[in-house]
Image (cartoon, coloured by chain):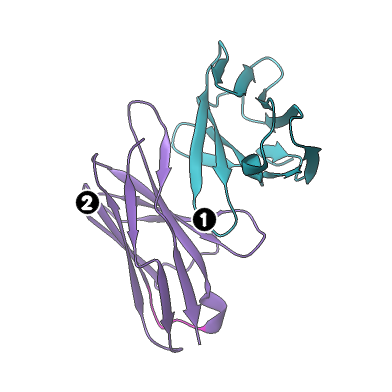
Amino acid sequence: RKEVEQDPGPFNVPEGATVAFNCTYSNSASQSFFWYRQDCRKEPKLLMSVYSSGNEDGRFTAQLNRASQYISLLIRDSKLSDSATYLCVVKGTYKYIFGTGTRLKVLA
Amino acid sequence: GAVVSQHPSWVICKSGTSVKIECRSLDFQATTMFWYRQFPKQSLMLMATSNEGSKATYEQGVEKDKFLINHASLTLSTLTVTSAHPEDSSFYICSASILATGELFFGEGSRLTVL
């Protein structure tokens, strides 16, 4: 089993739709959790950190479920510009483990 | 967010030459930086962890004599691809973390093409 797993997609959704991604992790001692966005041929950029209490930033909501060892990202009112690959990143004591990414395509 | 700068963005070189890529943390000190490689349509692959003032820690399968890493200051790490060959052509990205938050910030990446 991979340390961090994501559905690679692609998720094709119409503009305005709500879409959710999940990411599971295997190490229960993982300390920090993040969602990154990566556009084609660009570096990953931090979208948001994921806190135990959940957090929201505009149209984006992230949740952490430690009991079931997964994190989620919800995007409301999808825009064309949201099309990208979304990477789940889990930090242990010394290392950052990346998911393979979930590709999102928002269609006009 | 914090700024990590990488240089050069693009480099084309002949087979057999060496290429140096710089990674700088511009507004914070980074005791640890990470180097990744990414092939088209594939995931980021961690190559090595660069620690200021000490030897880098390489991932399994990454040749330390081929990918030389130097982290001489708290704001600069360099990756040198020695005797580059066409199969080394890839997108190389560095990152540095903010100790307090654990957030990871990436350089813009360096696209290497070896002819």
Instruction: Judge left or right: residue B42 versus residue B86.
Output: right
Q: Is residue A8 magenta?
A: no
Q: Secondary structure at mark 1?
A: loop
Magenta residues, as a range? B81-85
Instruction: Identify the residue under disc 1.
Output: A42
Chain to which mark 1 belongs = A
What hue represents chain A?
cyan
Q: Residue at x 47, y 73 (%)?
A: B112
Q: What kind of residue is marked 1? A: Lys
What hue represents chain B?
purple
Provide residue B24's location: percent of width, then percent of height.
Answer: 28, 53
The 10 Å Cα crowd at callout 2, few under 14, some 14 to 19, many 20 or more, is few
Instruction: Identify the residue under disc 2.
Output: B53
Q: Secondary structure at mark 2?
A: loop
The answer to whether tags 1 and 2 share a subunit is no
Chain to which mark 2 belongs = B
